[in-house]
Amino acid sequence: MLALQGLVDAQIGYRRAAGSTRASFSLSRADGISLSAPTMAESNGRNANGDSKDRTDGGLVHLQNRNLQSLDQDILYHLSLGTRSHDLVEMFGDVKHGIGTPSLQILLHEVIKLMHYARVKDPVFVRIGTSGGIGVEPGTVVVSDGAVNELMEPYHEQAVCGKMVKRSTKLNQDLAREIRDLRRQSDEFQVVNAKTMCAMDFYEGQGRLDGAFCYHTEEDKVQYLRELHKAGVRNIEMEATCFAAVTHLASIRSAIVCVTFLDRFKGDQVCPPKSVLSQWEVRPQEIVCRFIRRHLQSRTN
Ligand code: URA
């Protein structure tokens, strides 16, 4: 028995109006958006904790990140929208859900109970999905041999009844190696075992410079990525520690198989066209299908 958990990926974007002295995002109809925002200087009267004097500018949401001014295009990856291809004013509200540890943890509780009630024996759970790479070629499949939090600790932390509970994120090493070895010579991508860092956020939590807020520098980001790389981390996503901890607690063998969409040493935005991402996205599925096939065959032989 094998349970799969995939993620919905999406994109959104804005582009700064050419020649604008204000950070006013005023885009043509073809760009699909007409939006104004305060200057980045105006939004500097705020600290990293979010305190500010005034958040209103005719009701428009302020973007408090100077880094955004230098972008030619901003891809807001999870919302499946682009400023060239969509009318964001028309489409505002088209937000997809279903990522991150809270949703996953609910799902795991119920799937584990389901396994029990259905009397399933020796299930293997595999999380398949997408991630940001650290020092690996985009399109590489990472089969996690460890899952760490943002502080590089092998734990998933959760408050239960007002007390913090720390759970080990141990993953089955034999299973991780077995899945890695299912790469074929004809595959146009690498499959590697490495640690996966799980963040609580796509932007600041992953050291990105292109969020709506950014209070860290590029040097901070690069240093953090270097530390992660040195610790053996090769990809970042948002479910690994929860998935590893909960399955470990339930004594269920589990694996995490994610393709990388970019090398974070080279940037923050997920730039390849949708057609390329779609091809890459199926790579973890291909590898895991081989694993399922192999185990089904060994049962029938
Ligand atoms: N998913 C993430 O959590 N981070 C990335 O960089 C890409 C996909």
Image (tube, grey):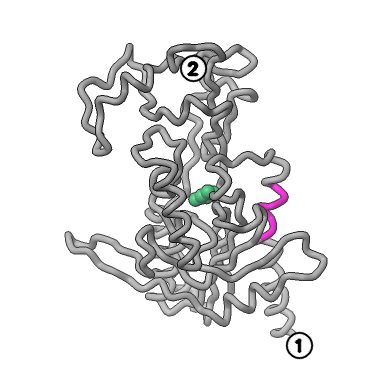
Q: Nearer the N terminus, badge 2 or badge 1?
A: 2
Q: Residue 191, image x and y in percent?
A: 66, 66
Is residue 231 located in the magenta-colored stretch of the structure?
A: no
**Kind of residue at disc 2:** Phe
Q: Label 1: which residue? A: 301
Residue farthest to the front, as pictured: 219
Q: Nearer the viewer, residue 155 or 96?
A: 155
Whether residue 125 is visible to the viewer of this picture, yes or no, is: no
Residue farthest to the bottom, as pictured: 301
Whether 266 is drawn above or below 139: the answer is above
Whether 200 is drawn above or below 284: the answer is above
**Kind of residue at disc 1:** Asn
The residue located at (53%, 42%) in the rendering is: 268
The part of the chain drawn in magenta is 278-283
Q: Residue 217, image x and y in percent?
A: 39, 41
Of circles 2 and 1, the one toward us is 2
Whether residue 170 is visible to the viewer of this picture, yes or no, is: yes
Disc 1 crowd rating (10 Å Cα; few below 14, some 14-19, many 20+) is: few
Q: Main secondary structure of the magenta part?
A: helix
Circle 1: element type: loop
Q: Which mark is residue 34?
A: none
Q: Is residue 36 left or right of residue 33?
A: left
Q: Nearer the viewer, residue 245 or 106?
A: 245
Q: Label 2: which residue? A: 25
